[in-house]
């Protein structure tokens, strides 16, 4: 979801951007107007994150999936090996890509437990020779989220932040590099934000494409080739909207309230259950099942009839998933909770609970 205020402003800029008579879509990326727009967006993002001066903000393309390969290309060359923590669908894809460019040490894996919890830090086997250690802060498909930041000592910590970027007040300075596709929580698809600490800028393998060489892009203001201008424009509006509404502390408080409301509704009735261990449940992707899984498609159909949409679970996990990204209001969650109560009342009688083995 995008904030309605942002969509309204974008609609008018589509026809006439700031009285120039030009659409924002028609601004050349090399023009002073676009540079000013981009600098402003970058400044607002730095302010939101309280980003220290020794970090660069890159506005690139490719999506997080491309950066699964680009991160190792840019960072792995030094030692040829990297630590990865396997927590679900997206970290698995990151691992598969990284393994094409060097040796991946899977430092910990939640696979045996069906990715229902984040592996406890004392179980991790980190490689002191790793070029970096990679985590996925929020597993979008499984509804699993880190609520602590691992201590990897001298090994730089790298994170895919795609689905919880700007959803909570995270200390970016605990990481050496983070990256996020924009389309989950920030802007339309096309933009990938990479935030990288200066000392990691010049480690790229020679095979790294110029437009995806983090060091070269940092020195060239992410303007080696045409950046995704429309997506950057909307991202700028969203950053300003977040600042106006109290910044990341306020957005985190709102996301905590939304997710707590939904998890409480799931806990209230035996009819619903969340497979994820309580301490590792996501604030942004709430995943649950019905006691009778055969009723799930009916649940989704009836929800759609009430205009409660996009609740289908990820194709790898099935079930129900409510994504509570920043622009989703509490009222949206309350409407879902009301529907859940109503659905459970209408269908509970047909299910017998706790009767294992007849
Ligand atoms: C959606 C998602 C991706 C993939 O993003 P693309 O822009 O499609 O490449 C990667 N990681 C996480 C955590 C995601 O949620």
Image: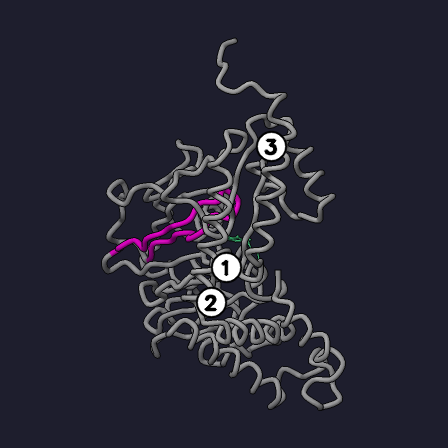
Pick the residue in front: 357 or 159.
357
Number of numbered labels in the structure image: 3
Q: Quadrant of ligand 1?
A: bottom right
Against 11, residue 313 (above or below) is: above
Circle 3 is placed at which residue position?
A: 344
- Label 3 C-beta lies within 8 Å of the nearest ligand 1 atom: no
Of tags 1 and 3, the one toward the viewer is 3
Circle 2 is placed at which residue position?
A: 194
**Residue 34, image x, y percentages:** 61, 84
Of tags 3 and 2, the one toward the viewer is 3
Pick the residue in front: 138 or 307.
307
Q: Is residue 59 visible?
A: yes
**Mark 3 vs mark 2, CA separation in Å:** 43 Å
User: Image point 56% across, 71% down: which residue?
Assistant: 238
Main SS of residues in magenta: loop
**Residue 341, image x, y percentages:** 59, 37
Pick the residue in front: 323 or 332.
332
Pick the residue in front: 89 or 2.
2
Report the magenta residues as a range.
Answer: 132-152
**Residue 41, image x, y percentages:** 52, 78
């Amino acid at each position: 979801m995008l904030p309605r205020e942002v969509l309204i402003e974008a609609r008018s800029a589509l026809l006439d951007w700031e009285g120039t008579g030009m659409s924002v879509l028609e601004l050349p990326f090399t023009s002073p107007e676009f540079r000013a727009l981009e600098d402003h967006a970058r400044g607002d993002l730095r302010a939101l994150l309280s980003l220290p001066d020794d970090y660069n903000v890159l506005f690139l393309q490719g999506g997080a999936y491309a950066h699964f390969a680009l991160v190792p290309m840019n960072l792995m060359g030094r030692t040829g090996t990297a630590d990865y923590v396997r927590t679900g669908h997206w970290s698995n894809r990151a691992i598969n890509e990284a393994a094409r460019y060097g040796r991946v040490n899977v430092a910990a894996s939640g696979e045996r437990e069906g990715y229902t919890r984040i592996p406890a830090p004392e179980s991790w086997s980190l490689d002191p020779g790793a070029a970096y250690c990679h985590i996925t802060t929020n597993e979008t498909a499984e509804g699993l989220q880190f609520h602590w930041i691992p201590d990897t000592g001298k090994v730089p910590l790298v994170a895919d932040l795609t689905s919880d970027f700007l959803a909570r007040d995270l200390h970016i300075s605990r990481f050496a590099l983070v990256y996020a596709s924009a389309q989950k929580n920030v802007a339309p698809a096309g933009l990938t934000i990479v935030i990288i600490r200066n000392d990691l800028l010049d480690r790229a393998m020679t095979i790294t494409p110029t437009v995806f060489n983090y060091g070269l892009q940092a020195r060239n203001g992410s303007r080696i080739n045409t950046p995704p201008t429309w997506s950057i424009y909307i991202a700028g509006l969203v950053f300003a909207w977040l600042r106006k509404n109290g910044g990341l502390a306020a957005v985190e408080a709102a996301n905590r309230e939304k997710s707590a409301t939904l998890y409480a509704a799931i806990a209230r009735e035996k009819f619903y259950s969340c497979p994820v261990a309580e301490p590792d449940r996501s604030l942004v992707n709430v995943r649950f099942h019905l006691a009778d899984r055969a009723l799930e498609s009916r649940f989704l159909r009836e929800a759609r009839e009430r205009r409660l949409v996009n609740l289908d679970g990820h194709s790898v996990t099935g079930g129900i998933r409510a994504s509570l990204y920043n622009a989703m209001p509490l009222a949206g969650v309350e409407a879902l909770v009301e529907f859940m109560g109503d659905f459970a009342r209408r269908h509970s009688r047909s299910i017998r609970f706790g009767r294992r083995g007849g």
